[in-house]
Image (cartoon, grey):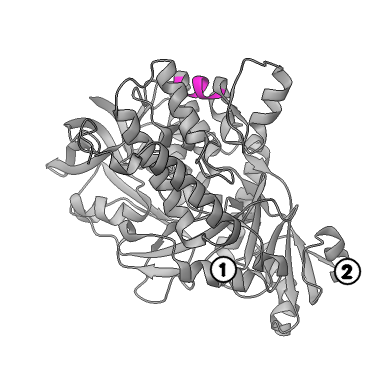
Amino acid sequence: MQTDVLIIGAGATGTGIARDLALRGVHCVVTESGDINAGASGGNHGLLHSGGRYVSNDTEAARECHEENLLLKRLAPQCVEDCGGLFVAVQGDDENFIADYPGWCAKAGVPVKTIDPDLAREMEPVLSDKLIAAYEVADASIDPFKLSLENMAHAKALTGSTLLRRTAVIGFDIEAGRIVRVQLVNTVTGEKSSIEATQIVNAAGAWTDRVAAMAGADISMLYSQGTLLVTHERMTDRVVNRLRPPGDGDILVPGGTVSILGTTSVTIPNPDLARPTVAEVDVNVRQGAGMIPSLMDTRYVRAYCGVRPLISAGGGDGRSVSRGFALFDHEDANLSNFCSVAGGKLTTFRMMAEKTADLVCRRLGNTKPSLTVSEPLPEASACEWTEPGRAPKLWAARHDSGDELLCECEMVPASAVDEIIHSCRDEFPDPGLQALGKRSRIGKGSCQGAFCGVRVAAHLYENGQMDSRQGLVKMREFFEERFKGQRPALWNAQLVQAELAEALHCGLLGLELVNPDDPQEVE
């Protein structure tokens, strides 16, 4: 296989680079060891920062967030819910910090509006009655899955660029200061292959340093795990931030029909070890309840975590390291066709992609400018199913009584599953529940896949998409992934839900007896 540019990593930055290059006429292949948004791009708040969070400690990152916030609202509105945001303080919070906040915002160029605490409580009734200060900012929520899927879809439409799922880089063949061949392996089948590319971009998130090391380049990184919680229902109209230096459990972001509470910052030695923990869940709930007391006894359907790929400056923890990004041309490692981009935030992914594509195009001799700063991101019909509430609206509008609802929590019909499979057939010829869940709301409701996982699998068997006991393995993988997130948040109603799921999956289907390595064998 050959291409102009091989991009390693299919998160927001990797897919954003593919789109930026495609707009300049460059063909790309994006390779990803898991699936789209498998790293930090899929494990975050879904918060489109106004910049207000960083004005006190990182003026440059705050300014970048503000500028990109405005651009994405204008150029990719279908991925953004422009809900607005509040920074609130309660009794006992640092009054000097509260007083200094507007000045820091002005210095960073981040618009902010002082509002009366009573008005803030009218706007968001769940806020604490101990509120002493409130500021309004231009925060918003963003659908990171829709964003990455549409970036990739546009790159494909422009130049035929492709995504290789579950394909990991295992080595580079280097001759005379150039990478002449990239060695790959399919992480499911173990089949090995190679690809030749004129330029190679390393956008592997928390694994960027490992990929760089394979080529003999050095990047010093710090892995900061952040755990978040998903509430059973949406609790606020706006993003709510605690008005204090960034800390644990101080942001609540509306994500369609639910809210996301977080996040922690725990330095870990290896991004492969990232798991949400009970201790992190507890601290998020305890801290969040300071600004919204009902967070203490609301129902949480799951927890999840991501790893911030931070550039280490030789000291400090995950809170103190800058949210800025760095672009490495690796010419100090005597490589002329390899670069890496790391750090940054979801909010600034477009800027990171533009700067990286500028470097790549200079090396390719391509003089076309980046267009992502002015060209709207087109909507792609196959990418619309990640949007909360979208499926029921379309299903109700169509009035098709024969279109069976496979997911009752998020009301995802069979036609949506069929459309996703049809549009992505070149990416996953063997459909699995995990891939469908990434591209829709399947498994994201309060049952966490207990019922829809079985219904979707049955639908795939009925229409011939699954035809062997391998389907049981895919069901087991899907339920295991959902349970991984439920485990640290099991109490009250969600514990009851989990026990019902166990009875269905083990007592009825016997999925715990399926041998993943040999589905024909029953353990």
Query: Residue pushed farthest front?
Result: 507
**Which region shows up in magenta?**
416-421
Which of discs 1 and 2 lies nearer the camera? The answer is 1
Callout 2 environment at 10 Å: few (<14), some (14 to 19), or many (20+)?
Answer: some
Where is residue 500 drawn, in percent x and y?
51, 47
Inspect the magenta stretch and tell me whether residue 324 lies in it: no
Query: Tag 1's secondary structure?
Result: helix
Q: Report which residue position mark 1 lands on.
A: 284
**In this image, 21 relative to 106: left or right?**
left
Name the residue type under label 2: Asp
Callout 1 environment at 10 Å: few (<14), some (14 to 19), or many (20+)?
Answer: many
**In this image, 388 relative to 192: left or right?**
right
Which sits earlier in the primary sequence, circle 1 or circle 2? 2
Query: Tag 2's secondary structure?
Result: helix
Q: Report which residue position mark 2 lands on.
A: 118
Kindly report the distance in space between the C-alpha atoms of the residues bearing marks 1 and 2.
25 Å
